[in-house]
Amino acid sequence: MEEYRSHAHSVSSCQYHFMWCRKYRHPVVGGVEGDVRELFGETTDHFGHEILALEIADDHVHLFVQCDPKHSPADIARQFKSYSGNHLLKRHPEIQEAYFWGSGFWKVRYYVRTTGAMPEEVVERYIEETEH
C-alpha cells in the first residue's frame, strides 16, 4: 500500500471505508463474489484507485480504498456500484428475474468514513495552535 500519492501539484493520502447493501438485502452477493471482485478490480484499474481491503458478504460489501483527491466519496461509490451492478445483472439475468422487479443491483444508500494517520484531536490542536 502506498501511504502517499504524488501528483503534479500535490501530495495526498485519501482513504475511505465504504459499505453498501444489496438491493432489498437479498442474500445473493456471495453467489457472485468472484464477479464482484473482478468488476471492482476493473473499476480500480480504470479510475486509478487501490483496493486496500474488500469483504464480500451475502447481502453487503465492505470496501477500503485509496484514491486520488480528484474523486469525491460520492463519485467513488457511484463508480464501483454502477459499473459492478450493471455488469452483474447482465451476466446473471436469473438474479434479476428472481430477486428484482426494478433496476439496480445495489441500494442507493451507502456508508463512507474517511481514515487518516492522525486522530482528529491532533488536527484540531494543530489548527488552533498555528499562528495566522
Image (cartoon, helix red, strand yellow):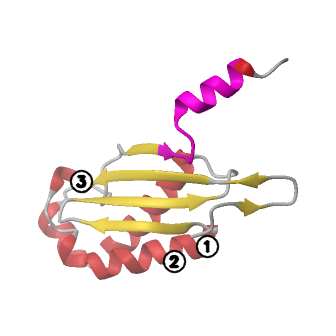
Q: Which residues are magenta?
A: 114-128
The quarter of the picture where residue 64 lies is: bottom left
Q: Which residue is label 2 attached to?
A: 42
* Residue 23's disc number: 3
Q: Nearer the viewer, residue 4 or 7?
A: 4
Element carrying mark 3: helix
Residue 123 located within the stretch drawn in magenta: yes
- Circle 1: is it few (<14), some (14-19), or many (20+) Cα within 10 Å? few
Is the residue under label 3 in contact with that under label 1 (CB below 8 Å)? no
User: Which corner quadrant holds the C terminus?
Assistant: top right
Residue 101 in percent (x, y) is at 19, 56
Question: Is 63 displayed left or right of 2 in the figure?
Answer: left
Q: Which residue is label 1 attached to?
A: 46
Question: Is 51 displayed left or right of 124 in the figure?
Answer: left
The quarter of the picture where residue 113 lies is: top left
Question: What amino acid type is highlighted by mark number 1?
Answer: His
Q: Nearer the viewer, residue 88 or 94?
A: 88
Is the residue under label 1 in contact with that under label 2 (CB below 8 Å)? yes
Question: What amino acid type is highlighted by mark number 2?
Answer: Glu
Q: Residue at x 61, y 52 (%)?
A: 14
The quarter of the picture where residue 22 lies is: bottom left
Residue 18 located within the stretch drawn in magenta: no
Q: Is residue 130 above or below residue 31?
A: above
